[in-house]
Amino acid sequence: MRKNPVKITALAILLGLLTATTTVIANTADSTDTLIDRLAQRFKLNRQEVQQVFDEYRQEKLAKKQKHFQTYLDQAVTDGKITEEQKQKILEKNQEMQQQIQELKNLDWQTKKERMSQIKQDYQNWLKENNIPLDVFPHKLGFYKHYKMPF
């Protein structure tokens, strides 16, 4: 089967635009599914293949963020800002929080916003309880801006 270069280029451009806007759009299953459906329908692509591209992209982006956060924490330990034990606690807590955030995926925007505020407050309290200075984190806990974890 011969692939149409115009369709492939258009899809690449759309994926690039999606990359630029994913931090603005809430991570709801409905909005992503709609976009996947639209792309598949418009360019006459297999919906499962389009879904696979999105899933792979998310996994790659998450792995990159996790690696960056790990490197950042390693440097914080080297610089004496936190201890190795604190670093491990932070990594464990972030895994726990990532699960909490995943559970918000299908909630309406207002409920999600309220729960994220509570998660953020709980995290700040946890940091204080574990004697971890808030200023250790880049961008003051990255999820403030886009409801993401600080990795």
Image (spheres, rainbow, N blue to C red):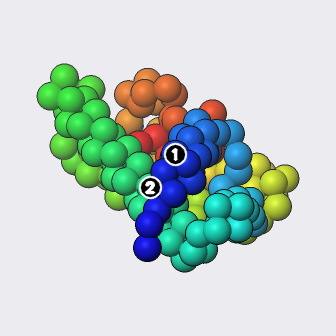
As rendered, which of 32 and 109 lies closer to the eye? Answer: 32
Residue 110: give its label. none
State whether residue 74 appears in this view. Answer: yes
Amino acid type shown at disc 2? Tyr
Q: Residues within 10 Å of mark 1 (few under 14, many from 20)?
A: few
For the question of whether residue 103 can be seen, the reply is no
At 38% from the left and 28% from the top, the residue drawn is 136
Disc number at residue 9? 1
Foreground disc of the pair 1, 2:
1
- Circles 1 and 2, Cβ within 8 Å, touching? The answer is no
| Mark 1 or mark 2, earlier in chain | 1
Side of 116 relative to 79 (left or right): right
Specify the quadrant of the image occupied by residue 120. Answer: top right
In the image, residue 115 sits, relative to residue 136, either above or below, namely below
Residue 57: mark in rendering: 2
Q: Quadrant of residue 130?
A: top left
Q: In which quarter of the image is residue 108?
A: bottom right
Q: Indicate the position of residue 23 as horizontal and vertical percent values.
A: 61, 41
Q: Judge left or right: residue 12 versus residue 56.
A: right
Front one among 127 and 136: 136
Residue 33: x and y, percent? 69, 67
Q: Residue at x 38, y 44 (%)?
A: 65
**Crowd tier of the residue under label 2, counting other residues whose Cα lies within 10 Å: few below 14, some 14–19, many 20 or above:** some
Up-down relation of residue 60 to residue 82 (above or below): below
Give percent across and percent down for residue 61: 41, 49
Amino acid found under the numbered disc labelled 1: Thr
* Viewport quadrant of the N terminus: bottom left
